[in-house]
Amino acid sequence: MKRILIAEDDMVSRKFLCKFLSKYGECDLVVDGLEAIDAYMLNVQEKTPYNLICLDIMMPKIDGVKVLKTIRDLEKQQDLQETEKAKIIMTTALGDSNIVQSAFDFGCNAYANKPLDMKKITEVLEKIEFIK
């Protein structure tokens, strides 16, 4: 079973993503960036790494771009091959192209604008080859 982490401070978006993505794997939900890093590290220690991580850019404590950078740095330390790394999708209501560009610079696989809908998420999941 695939493992999915959803880091989203907005309850409606979090519930939507969980409901939609649960057919593709087991979902863990966190509400801020610090919890996202903790969940990532815990799953690495338990040898059950995440296959997919959905990160909201605007989150309390640590924003999504910093979480993305931290996860990619941790993957480097573990010497993971490209195929072993988590697929990371950034989500945001912001239309700021600088933030989106910095997310891609730090290694996100895709970006989805809010409000999220099934069609948009399905297209993103297909694009990053998480689903066929």
Image (cartoon, rainbow, N blue to C red):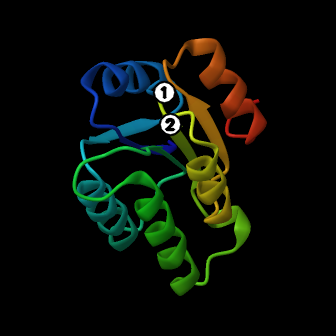
Q: Does 129 sit above or below residue 64?
A: above
In front: 117, or 104? 104
Q: Residues within 10 Å of mark 2 (few under 14, many from 20)?
A: many
Residue 5: x and y, percent? 40, 45
Sequence-first tag of 1 and 2: 1
User: Would residue 58 appear left or right of 109 to someone viewing this image?
Assistant: left
Circle 1: element type: helix
Which residue shows up at 68% across the image and 31% down it?
Answer: 124
**Which mark is in front, 1 or 2?**
2
Q: Residues within 10 Å of mark 1 (few under 14, many from 20)?
A: many
Residue under pointer 2:
91
Residue 131: x and y, percent? 69, 32
**Whether residue 48 is visible:** no
User: Would residue 82 appear left or right of 91 to someone viewing this image?
Assistant: right
**Whether residue 56 is visible:** yes
Which residue shows up at 48% across the image and 35% down it?
Answer: 92
Q: Type of residue at label 2? A: Thr
Residue under pointer 1:
21
Q: Type of residue at label 1? A: Leu
Which residue shows up at 77% across the image and 35% down it?
Answer: 127
